[in-house]
Image (tube, rainbow, N blue to C red):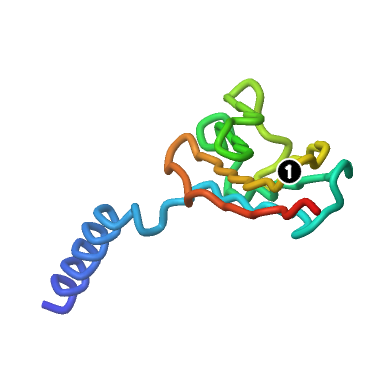
């Protein structure tokens, strides 16, 4: 009787875990590192910290994009033959600040999707 109860418990747990795998899904996340204010004409370095658990041909970040003031500025694309350098990595670029900038970034896992956009604003004075 006790063995039957243990087997049933394991079966229920296995079914629960198979249906709740989305809860444990590993989505790609991004965080923008940028100054809050800069002087007009200044060269500004923007860093995008990309976090994702796993970096294999079958499971990896497949793209990261940046929009500045609503327009796509840059997109990095990855695939099984061109993987990111690590599961967590930093993308960096420099641009000249001429006006206030709303910067939005997002990354995507090829299996689980995205944690969503990250947004910062740089005030240009």
The quarter of the picture where the N terminus appears is bottom left
User: Quick one: SS at disc 1?
Assistant: loop
Residue 42 vs residue 73, the one in the foreground: 42
Residue 109 position within the rendered picture, expressed as x and y whole percent measured from the top left: 50, 40
* Corner quadrant of residue 87: top right
The outermost residue toward the front is 125
Mark 1 nearby-residue class (10 Å; few <14, some 14–19, many ≥20):
some
Residue 27 position within the rendered picture, expressed as x and y whole percent measured from the top left: 48, 48
The quarter of the picture where the C terminus appears is bottom right
Residue 110 position within the rendered picture, expressed as x and y whole percent measured from the top left: 48, 34
The outermost residue toward the bottom is 2
Residue 9 vs residue 118, the one in the foreground: 118
Q: Which residue is drawn at the image coordinates 61% and 27% (left, top)? A: 78
Q: State the residue position of label 1.
A: 99
* Corner quadrant of residue 36: bottom right
Residue 83 vs residue 72, the one in the foreground: 72
Q: Which residue is drawn at the image coordinates 86% and 51% (left, top)? A: 39
Left or right: residue 101 versus residue 42 is left
Residue 2 vs residue 31, the one in the foreground: 31
Q: Which residue is drawn at the image coordinates 41% and 57% (left, top)? A: 24
Q: Which residue is drawn at the image coordinates 51% and 39% (left, top)? A: 108
The outermost residue toward the top is 81
Report the number of discs: 1
* Corner quadrant of residue 94: top right
Residue 5 position within the rendered picture, expressed as x and y whole percent measured from the top left: 15, 74
Left or right: residue 64 versus residue 122 is left
Left or right: residue 74 versus residue 110 is right
């Amino acid at each position: 009787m006790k063995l039957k109860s243990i087997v049933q418990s394991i079966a229920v747990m296995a079914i629960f875990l198979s249906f709740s795998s989305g809860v444990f899904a590993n989505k790609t996340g991004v965080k923008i590192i940028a100054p809050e204010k800069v002087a007009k004409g200044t060269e500004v370095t923007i860093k995008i910290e990309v976090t994702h658990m796993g970096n294999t041909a079958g499971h990896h970040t497949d793209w990261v994009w940046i929009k500045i003031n609503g327009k796509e500025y840059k997109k990095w694309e990855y695939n099984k033959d061109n993987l990111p350098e690590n599961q967590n990595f930093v993308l960096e670029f420099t641009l000249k600040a001429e006006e206030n900038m709303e910067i939005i970034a997002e990354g995507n896992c090829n299996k689980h999707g995205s944690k969503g956009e990250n947004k910062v604003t740089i005030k240009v004075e």
